[in-house]
Image: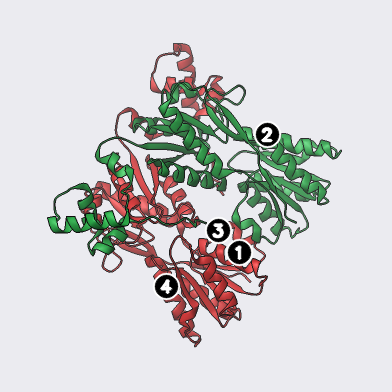
Chain colours: A red, B green
Amino acid sequence: MDFQKPRVTINEIAELAGVSIATVSRALNNRPGISQKTKEKVQRIITQTGYQPNIFARNIREHQTKLIGLIISDASNEFFKQVSRAVQDQAALAGYSVIMLNSDENPAEEMQAIQILRHYDVSGLIIASTDTHLDYHQLVGDTPTVFFDRAPSPDKQSQFDTLLVNNVSGAELAVSELIRQGASKIGILSSGVSTAGKERQQGYLKALAEYHLPLDQNLIYTSDVKQIKALDYAHELLMTHHCDGIFAADNTLLLVVLQEIKLLHRPNIKVATFDNTAWFDYFKQPVISVKQPTATIGHQAVDLVLKRIKEPTLPAKTRRFSVQLIRRG
Amino acid sequence: MDFQKPRVTINEIAELAGVSIATVSRALNNRPGISQKTKEKVQRIITQTGYQPNIFARNIREHQTKLIGLIISDASNEFFKQVSRAVQDQAALAGYSVIMLNSDENPAEEMQAIQILRHYDVSGLIIASTDTHLDYHQLVGDTPTVFFDRAPSPDKQSQFDTLLVNNVSGAELAVSELIRQGASKIGILSSGVSTAGKERQQGYLKALAEYHLPLDQNLIYTSDVKQIKALDYAHELLMTHHCDGIFAADNTLLLVVLQEIKLLHRPNIKVATFDNTAWFDYFKQPVISVKQPTATIGHQAVDLVLKRIKEPTLPAKTRRFSVQLIRRG
């Protein structure tokens, strides 16, 4: 929900002046097709209202690109929707526009996305890696780049600015809450591919250990990111293994779990997930969720890219944000 | 949810060959830094697996842009998330990548987005207009362009290919269902700005007339698209006007209505909305919804743009898709 105070827009200027938006644009850009009288009228209203023509339009006119390239890895995931929204808002404040491409969890697509964006000479890149061992130094070259959600080199210290969240403790909090709510046989459905998925699995194991629950490898399902098998796995957790709690490590996996719970009429299963959406507050089945600071991640990603555009030799930093447990049930 | 059969990816090639993705890329692109032996090995595996390097990478190498520009008007709206997903899928099949910009319901931002995308020489444009009277002929020039969701010239026959849905009958279906479920005093919260909002209001009026319910202007609230006042309006519908049913004309307005119903503990209020998400099936409060054919809209938008790239002089067509009522309650 956006409750920001709106700025004066070009169409309000057009309305106040009683002219078309194209005419306002002509006045702003000193283009022909507008009388001197109309131009003066429009310019008077612009002065009175304090209207600020967007910096980007000027950059385009002056042939400077002021673009940031954003590569997300899954367009259907609520987390990326929220972060990309924050990236756009923060970039706009600094006079940058954002061009977004979706790698669809495919490293080949991610490579191509980087090539496209560099080809178009973006000022900086913000990337949610597909989490393989791509040679990012070669790929991004000297384009200022910030990674988020997943580290560009999962096994070693990142040589790029990197924004992560504390996946282990987030998952631990969520699974501990399932246990406190009475679940004692808890299955996990996580993405086996991504670092985030692996870390969330670690958090699950930590919670079990903390509460002295036995570890059963049969209750640990790692689905590929495309969820090809997730429905089968959810079915097995409920029917074969008789779980009374499930931790779905992201929102797409949660949807599969909810679908299966509804199909099998098992409303008493306790459910937890990573990521939070506004819709969860209205569910019949209470869903424990872990809220990531998506706005902060998006804003800081832009701030770091802009900083690095100014000072390319700054040492790279990795930041891990803490997450918030949202109890429901 | 995506249950597609995955194609062979570059990282699978790398794994099979026991080399890095960068090495596969070198082999594919005939770049230095790879031995003849390794190159032959990679190429053998590529032949065996039937791996198809994405057409886009070749276009970039050959300096042909194969890009479609997509401008959506509200990144937080589920409808646009679904359509943009379908646009990306369909474009990928034809070897095009999609660059997305968000106008944020601001005509000035929309103008700039068009300028940016033309500056980057996209092959075609797909636009959800911010629904003002922009001079699109001047703005898009000779770039093949398809509009969706909102007509580029609301009051007259569009001179561009345009994909719309039947908003009037969709809203009429939803409000009729509210009445059949027992609601007799139904308020409406709709966007007053967009054509879609206005048409959905017409559908509301038609349903009332059909069921001989009195028309009360006090129950018709049009919020600006930013929802600055939507919470107050929802409060008034429930507390001042004692409505027993509410039609929220889009998902963002629905969220406001659900929030207010929860705050005021009024679970018996009947609720309907336009657009559908997978989450609605799990709500405590049943929500009647109208499902737009988002996949078809996205696919056809791409098909029409590609057709127009080939044959620029085709006469423009406007298509209206029918929508589907999803009963819950």
Residue at x 45% of width, y 14% of height = A34
Q: Which residue is mark 3?
A: A277
Q: Chain of mark 3?
A: A
Q: Which residue is mark 4?
A: A168
Figure disc tally: 4
Mark 2 vs mark 4: tell me if same chain. Answer: no
Q: Chain of mark 4?
A: A
Give how far apart the Cα atoms at labels 2 and 1 are: 34 Å
Return the x and y of residue A110 as percentages of the image width and height: 34, 52
Looking at the rendered structure, the secondary structure element under dot 3 is loop
State which quadrant residue A148 falls in.
Answer: bottom left
Name the amino acid type tagged 4.
Val
State which quadrant residue B139 falls in.
Answer: top left
Q: Is residue A67 left or right of residue B260?
A: left
- How would you rate the neighbour count of disc 2 (Cα within 10 Å): few for under 14, some for 14-19, many for 20 or more? many
Name the amino acid type tagged 1.
Gln
Q: Chain of mark 1?
A: A
- First of labels 3, 4 by sequence position: 4
Residue at x 24% of width, y 62% of height = B17
User: In front: mark 2 or mark 4?
Assistant: 2
Looking at the rendered structure, the secondary structure element under dot 2 is helix
Looking at the rendered structure, the secondary structure element under dot 4 is helix
- First of labels 3, 1 by sequence position: 1
